[in-house]
Structure formats: structure tokens, C-alpha cells
Image (cartoon, rainbow, N blue to C red):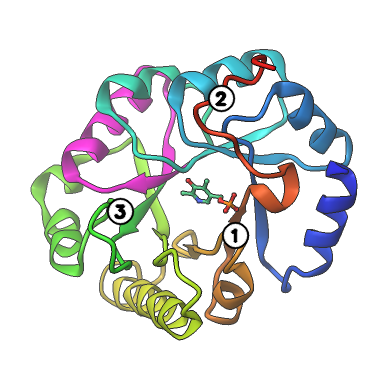
Amino acid sequence: MIKENLTKVRSTLADGVRLVAVSKTKPVEMLQEAYDAGQRLFGENKALEMRDKHAVLPQDIEWHFIGHLQTNKIKYIAEYVSLIHSIDSLHLLEAVDKEAEKHGRVIDCLLQFHIATEETKFGLDMDEATALLESAEYGAMKHVRIVGVMGMATNTDNYDLVRHEFRTLHGYYEQLKAKYFAGHAEFKEVSMGMSHDYRIAMEEGATLVRIGSTIFGARNYGVPVNDV
Ligand SMILES: *Cc1c(COP(=O)(O)O)cnc(C)c1O
């Protein structure tokens, strides 16, 4: 099924859009199945879960961290993570910079924006992002590279609202590009869209879509995988 699901999803991707297969909560056997079907880019939202999966799966997988990241957990992913989608504070970016330095790496990061109407979702607003980018602390960092923006739309079937939120995020991307990243070719990523809304996200300029349940099936939170 995973192979078929992947084939279906891939057939719907717009040119230049990369698929992050969101494998959180799913066992490594399922990730291996996706890998065998050609998938190399996986997204996880828990540092320890990513560490454990990274340890046993093929080494050419590109691991993207997409969840809320606690500073004391960066150490579990710093050595190999290829993109952190969820930078929502200067403090977190500083901590990533420090851990990356220990491994002699530069870690690519996205600034996560709060675009949804829900209170609970993490993310910066434009003022906070501006303050971060203009701070002396950011100016001194040598081991992180900001390559774009990320956001999650409101979880609703009001697709006008969802489209509006994605359009807002793309607007933030354009503003930041013009003001802080002109001439930086690497600043090119707009990470938005999940299983139920990625088509709209692509229409609004997504370059990375993060798709889980359409590929791996619904997640069953609260019930351990081995609990029958
Ligand atoms: C879980 C998750 C996704 C994928 O959600 P699906 O609805 O399963 O496609 C995408 N982005 C983030 C940040 C997530 O936590």
C-alpha cells in the first residue's frame, strides 16, 4: 500500500515541489517500505524517535525535523539532520548553532510562522522574525543557515481560510527574501501543506509539502504500536 500511496501522491506534485514523507509514530518497517519505493526524504517531529530511526535505516535518507524542538533535544539530531523546519525563536536558533558547531556542520533551518487562527500552533509573527534576523546574536552565528519559511494552516475545511493563510506565509517569504536574503539563492523554501491541504499549498507556492497519513495511513495516538 505504501508504494501505491507514494506513487499516487507523487503524481499530484507540481514541478519543483519536494515531498517530505511524514513518518512520525510509524514503525521503521514502514519507512523502509517507502525507502524501497524510492523515497529518501522523511519528516519526524520527535528528536528521540528520529535518532532511533536514523540509527537503523539507510544512511542516505535526508531527515527533516518538523516538530516543536526543545533545546535539550537538539543533540540527538544535530549530527545528521538535513533541515529543521521549526525554528520559532532566537533562543532555539542559537542552541542549534551551538550543537551544529560541535559537529563542524552548518544546519539548514526554516523560520516557522504562526499563520493559523488556532492559538496552540507554534511560530513567529513578522515582527519577531524581523527582530531575530536583525539581532547581533543571529549576525554572529556561523553554523546555521536560514533557507526559507514554514507554516501550518488552520485545521479546517474552510479552504478559503486555508488558502488565505498559505498566501500570507508566501507573502512573508517574499518580504524576507527582498529585505534580508536578496542574492541568497539558498533562501528558496516554502514548507506548507499536509495531507488534506497540500494541493492548495502548491497552488500558493509551496516548495516542500509534508505528507503523512495519505502515505502511511492514519496515526493512532495513545495506542502503542504493539498493543493489540
Ligand atoms: C504530522 C505533521 C504533518 C503531516 O500531517 P498529515 O495530515 O498526516 O499529512 C505535517 N506537518 C507537521 C508539522 C506535522 O506535525
Q: Nearer the viewer, residue 31 or 71?
A: 31
Element at badge 3?
Answer: loop
Q: Position of residue 119 (x, y in %)?
A: 23, 58
Which mark is drawn over residue 209?
1
**How many C-alpha atoms fall within 10 Å of the one at disc 3: few (<14), some, or many (≥20)?**
some
- Which residue does the numbered mark 2 point to in the structure image? 223
- Counting residues from the start of the chain, the first of labels 2 and 3 encountered is 3
Which mark is drawn over residue 109?
none
Specify the segment rendered in magenta: 84-108
- Counting residues from the start of the chain, the first of labels 2 and 1 encountered is 1
Left or right: 36 in relation to 227? right
Marks 1,3: beta carbons within 8 A:
no
- The answer to if 140 sits in the magenta stretch is no
Whether residue 109 is situated above or below residue 99 in the rendered picture: below
Q: Mark 2 or 1, which is nearer the eye?
A: 2
Distance from disc 1 to disc 3, alpha carbons, whole Å, reads: 18 Å
Whether residue 198 is situated above or below residue 143 in the rendered picture: below
Which residue is painted at 30% across and 78% down in the image? Answer: 175
